[in-house]
Amino acid sequence: MPGSLLILTGPPGAGKSTVARLVTEGAPRAAVHLHTDSFYVSIRTGFVAPYLPEAARQNEVVLGVIAEAACGYARGGYDVVLDGVVGPWALEPFRAAAKRDGLDLFYVVLRPDLEATLARGTARGAPELTDVEPLTGMHAAFSALGELERNVMDTTDDTIEETAEAVRQRARSAAFRL
């Protein structure tokens, strides 16, 4: 039986990686936690910070590779939780690969308010992104999602454990399906 693919996204500092780890460690089925940053740090020469405009081609390639890896695990029966900054602009490779493979695809945006995002984001240590300007810009990128607003979980006042429990309970439901 194939697994599923859950994209857990939002701005840096939203808690994606910690929530993804908690959700996969406590999963009732075989589960994989894929962290998009792991794919980017593999680029040893010619790396461009993915939030910069000149990273467009690099991001296209990396997102395609991530989509194939995630779907490969899901085809093998694993439930995949992919965490990273995967905005609506980056969903096409995942939609296409999941459709091709007949996999369930879910999309959850963890979105604390800007104040909480900046507090959490700037408190992180190296090598995490802690600069206010890109954190603010990426928060803004998730602020008006149109039809995907239904995929948002406001985590401003939630602990990381409460957020993980909400993701466990709700994320793989029809409300969050793409």
Image (cartoon, rainbow, N blue to C red):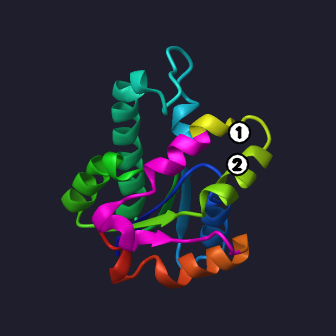
Q: Nearer the viewer, residue 15 or 70?
A: 15
Q: Nearer the viewer, residue 96 or 74?
A: 96
Question: Can you see residue 109?
Answer: yes
Above or below for 8 versus 131: below
Would you say 103 lies left or right of 72 here? left
Q: Residue at (54%, 61%) from the top-left corner?
A: 32
- Amino acid type of the residue that numbered disc 2 sits on in the rendered structure: Gly
Above or below for 100 versus 43: below
Q: Position of residue 125 (x, y in %)?
A: 80, 41
Where is residue 142, by image quadrant?
bottom left
Q: Disc 2 or 1, which lies upstream in sequence? A: 2
Please tell me the numbered disc located at residue 121. 2
Q: CA distance from mark 2 to mark 1?
A: 5 Å
The stretch of residues the image draws in magenta is 135-158
Local packing at callout 1 (Cα closer than 10 Å; few below 14, some 14-19, many 20+) is some
What secondary structure is marked by label 2? helix
Q: Position of residue 16 (x, y in %)?
A: 60, 59
* Residue 141 part of the magenta segment: yes
Please identify the quadrant where the N terminus is shown. bottom left
